[in-house]
Amino acid sequence: MVSTTSGVKAVWQEFHQRLRGFITQRVNNPADVDDILQEVFVRIYQRVTTLRDTERLESWIFQITRNAIIDYYRKAYHQPEFTTEDALEVLAIDEDPVVFNQQMAACLRPLLEHLPEPYRKALQLAEFEGRTQKAIAQELGISLSGMKSRVQRGRQKLKELLQTCCQLQMDAVGNVIEYEMKDIPMCRSCGLAELVDD
């Protein structure tokens, strides 16, 4: 049962890293991220008894987090009237970074087919199959530095292809935080095309 102090501690252990990531994607200042995260858990503790359906715990927690972020921006910009449009802009990213990463991976796999063979194979084995670059280098009969170079160049070429297909928005450290698919034939094979069409 979540209504106990130990239940709230369990919620903290399960969700605090995901919530920190969710907030970090929307708020640049790390100190503010920590403040918002603390506020979220205060609100969870104060309101946990109002949660009627524990099956909806995760969506309830993310709704509290979204509201805390909106309150942060409302206070930061001294805007008592924070519009729905403002809120949608702040909260444009899918609430679950895992889902977002799966969507991006669905787009990258078909784009791999457009890379030259050495880069395609290097990325397929290293990034999608999770094999070590050292093991791949030995298998392909090339030096480790040669393998690292292939992976690095392959990543760059894949990024260029992705930017051809999608308008990307990056966070401060270069992670993709939002995308909009362009209407280009090569890009229609991307797994995102199905998500956009639905």
Image (spheres, rainbow, N blue to C red):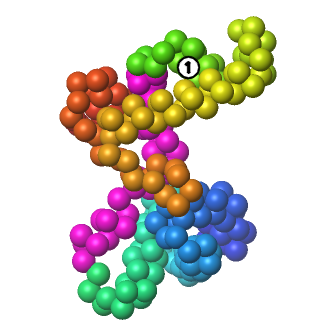
Residue 56 location, x and y as percent? 46, 57
Inspect this view and state whether residue 55 appears: no
Give above or below for 27 relative to 103: below
Residue at position x 58%, y 23% from top?
123
In this view, the residue in front, 93 or 160, is: 160
User: Image quarter for residue 195?
Assistant: top left
Q: Is residue 150 above or below residue 121?
A: below
Label 1: few (<14), some (14–19) or many (≥20) C-alpha neighbours in 10 Å: many
Q: Position of residue 71 (x, y in %)?
A: 42, 81
Residue 165: which quarter of the image? top left
Q: Is residue 181 magenta?
A: no
- Where's residue 140, x and y in %? 71, 9
Name the residue located 52 percent from the left edge and 12 percent from the top edge.
117
Report helix, strand or loop for mark 1: helix
| Amino acid type, callout 1 | Tyr
* Relative image position of residue 51 (x, y in whole percent): 48, 69
- Along the line of sight, the residue nearer the viewer: 23 or 187: 187
- Quadrant in which the C terminus is drawn: top left
Q: Is residue 109 left or right of residue 189?
A: right
Q: Which residue is mark 1?
A: 119
Quarter holding the N terminus is bottom right
Q: Is residue 72 above or below residue 7?
A: below
Secondary structure predominantly adopted by residues drawn in magenta:
helix
The segment highlighted magenta reads 83-112
Front residue of this view, candidates 145 and 191: 145
Residue 81 visible in the shown view: yes
